[in-house]
Image: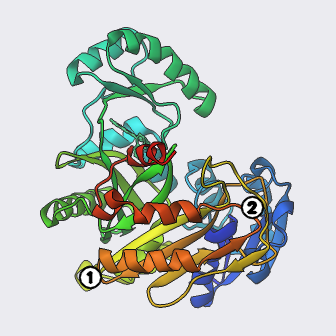
Amino acid sequence: MFEKILIANRGEIALRIQRACREMGIKTVAVHSTADSTAMNVRLADESVCIGPPPARGSYLNVAAILSAATITGADAIHPGLGFLAENADFAALVEEHGFTFIGPSAEHIRLMGDKVRAKDEARRLGIPIVPGSPTAVSDIGAAMAAARLVDYPVLLKASAGGGGRGMKLARNEAELARMLPLAQTEAKAAFADDSVYLERYLERPRHIEVQLLGDGDGGVIHLGERDCSVQRSHQKLLEETPSPALAPAARQRIQTLAVNALKKLGYKSAGTMEFLYQDGEFYFIEMNTRLQVEHPISEMVSGVDIVREQIRIAAGEALDHRQSDISLRGHAIECRINAESPDNFRPSPGRISEYHAPGGLGIRVDSAAYQGYEVPPYYDSLIAKLVIHGANRAECLMRLSRALDEYVIGGIETTLPLHQRLVEDAGFRRGDYHIHWLDEFLARSR
Ligand code: MV4
């Protein structure tokens, strides 16, 4: 097992990883920007290294500084966390070339899944249902129109190097497609330095359902159930839950088996997530994330499996600590993302947290690096806490969630706590009756 792990991240996720290391008796190195020197993950780490100024380019994306920090502190392995360098195949390869272990999948698997056209092709080969679309990138309007005719309108143009929704363009007919193709290509070029785009049949009101997976690289693969991440706006998730209120047992079983078998054939090593759109009883693969995800705690709450510990064990060459038959998915879990932003217009609200009191009690977990007196810096993602609730069933989970939201005090800055309170009271949400555009409609209604 590793003796010392460098955590190349910040905030709540850096602290989450550090907690797993502590429990495993592994020493930790925190790296931080000059804006994060008073952060809780830095204070609690065994060692810390300042790696540069606040803009991520200078610090959390500064590969040379991170590798130097690993060298001078004598770390054995680097955990990238999520965001920043977590899905950068070149970084994963460089970490290994410098003699450290990258805690994550192989650089080849990261690269494969980072190319959305190749990822879809691989999924199809592995027997996973995909959204009907162009089998390759469409470089000119002739190719785009031919592909669109085959799958039928409306169609969605997506960047091959994209993901997360950036640069997508909807076209409801040929005239719109002709107008949108150059726009999509220009945006893809600007955002990802690659102008290739592909096209898919547009699904109007799907849910976003993803399967949490763990592979040991040696054919051992387990799933920890699915997560329903449909409650989102502008591709930012607000709340996730497991199990999905939309799935009947047979559909759930079907997607779990498909995902596990595919990952076995892939020889995938580490934690990963397969993302699907789900509409009218059908699943459509869209992307695979080759990293730990923000919403991983809800899967931990229902499965009892520590996903970060498993990532570390697998990276150290140990076998999975769990067999599928040993895992029972118990009860229901919901995560609310608490952001330092206005609950009305979602504008960031950095500043000093003057009062802080986190909720507690049975079935309540708070993943946060915030504390009273902490200054939320303006440079980063505004996520400051994840409130994670477990209950024997969805009704108990909602009951606890309401109570925990009431109990949570974060003063001095604006947070999304009041929005979550309104959400959990909504009749549609309580019925579990929502899709990926549901939150936009909810927000429009409540204006
Ligand atoms: C789609 C879609 C509808 N039809 N693909 C957005 C993020 C990226 N990962 C895939 N996305 C979508 N792909 C087809 N063929 C709708 C979305 C989408 C979405 C997906 C998941 C969660 C939130 C979303 C919000 C808007 C659009």
The relative height of residue 446 versus residue 405 in the rendered view (above or below) is above
Residue shown at 30%/61% (left/top)? 432
- Asked if 400 appears above or below 248 in the picture, the reply is below
- Residue 67 is labelled as 2
> Residue type at mark 2?
Leu
User: Of the residues shown, which amino acid type is indicated by label 1?
Assistant: Ser
Label 2 and label 1: CA atoms lie apart by 40 Å
Going 45% across and 39% down the picture, which residue do you hit?
115
Image position, residue 66 (x, y; %):
75, 61
Q: Report the residue at 31% width, 13% height from top.
A: 145
Side (left or right) of 292 relative to 9: left
Residue nearer the viewer, 377 or 66: 377
* 76 vs 159: above or below: below
- Name the residue carrying label 1: 328
* Label 1 lies in ligand 1 vicinity (Cβ under 8 Å): no
Name which quarter of the figure residue 429 lies in.
bottom left
Label 2, residues with CA under 10 Å away: few <14, some 14-19, many ≥20: some
- Residue 231 visible in the picture: yes
Q: Secondary structure at mark 1?
A: loop
Question: Which one is in front in this view, the residue at disc 2 or the one at disc 1?
Answer: 1
Q: Nearer the viewer, residue 156 or 60?
A: 156
Q: Is residue 319 visible?
A: no
**x, y percent for residue 50:** 85, 66
Kindly give the residue lying farthest to the left in the view shown: 250
Q: Secondary structure at mark 2?
A: helix
